[in-house]
Amino acid sequence: MNADALNGRLLFAIPKKGRLHEKCLELLAGADIQFRRDHRLDVCLVKNQPIALVFLPAADIPSFVGKGNVDLGITGQDVILEARMQEHVTEVLKLSFGKCALQVQVPEAGSIQTVEQLAGKRVVTSFEVLSGEYFGKLDRQLNLTGEQKTKIEYVGGSVEAACALGLADGIVDLVESGDTMRAAGLHAIATLLQSEAVLIKSSKPKHESLEPLIKLLTSRIAGVVAASKYVICEYNILREKLHAATSITPGRRAPTISPLEDEDWLAVSSMVEKRKVADVMDELVKIGAEDILIFNLDNCRV
């Protein structure tokens, strides 16, 4: 695809593979971003908006957004820090998926069980910058100099195998469920940071004419994210119990309260986090709420 085809279009970078890719495709579908990606092509045009999608490695997206011509991107907070692009990009929206922790892991049955014991030894990672900063600070605290300093070595994949294969005394890697680490006989002794997928844009706006489209996309994506996190809870409650009820269901902003024909009763509608919905319903029953109904959200605007 030549550069002329991209003129005037908002460039939106999406991870081309890996843990964030499928979730990003679901997000685009929910935001009604319609496209067809030809096999092996990493750039495609959106059919119903002046947008071009650019499929890139997640680790490269912060640089393309911060220093290149890409207007928006989705990537992990961890790779923004690893690429040292936090001054060049702005987090527009947290996306509530891709949550993980960057952790120091060592063999569970080994003699090293603290980061102080690991300092000065061999550490393998795909995150050289963050690992170097973490262990550099630790080395200084422990007065380790010269050959005594922690040795950081980069590998591009299968980091969890480094200890078992004799390449490392410990590793630094992203952990989601922890199943892979446990299978490798490893356990965490420190956490460098918590990370999740975020929508980012350049800290310095590139194309003023595209700002309205950036706001539109941000609003749509925020709606899709909210719909994945919340349900609508509706119920009837005695007027005298309204304060107790709304403390249980305060809503994302505020609940909607409507009168009923029986003036002693009110109808309440409120957004409730999915993960809390069972407890919320139990609490409402305790204070006398009736006709409690839960509705899933396909999409919304918040």
Image (spheres, rainbow, N blue to C red):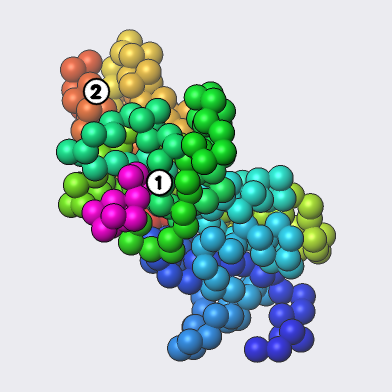
At 33% from the left and 14% from the top, the residue drawn is: 244
Residue type (three-letter) at the residue carrying disc 1: Arg
Rendered image: mark on residue 231: none
Residue type (three-letter) at the residue carrying disc 2: Leu
- Between the C-alphas of marks 2 and 1, the distance is 55 Å
Q: Is residue 113 above or below residue 93?
A: above
Crowd around label 1: few <14 · some 14–19 · many ≥20 (10 Å) = some
* Residue 268 shows up from this direction: no
At 24% from the left and 54% from the top, the residue drawn is: 164
List x then y, in percent, for residue 216: 64, 57
- Is 165 one of the magenta-colored residues? yes
* Residue 153 shows up from this direction: yes
What residue is pinned by disc 1? 122
Q: Is residue 15 above or below residue 241?
A: below
Q: Quadrant of the N terminus?
A: bottom right
Q: Residue furthest right?
A: 208
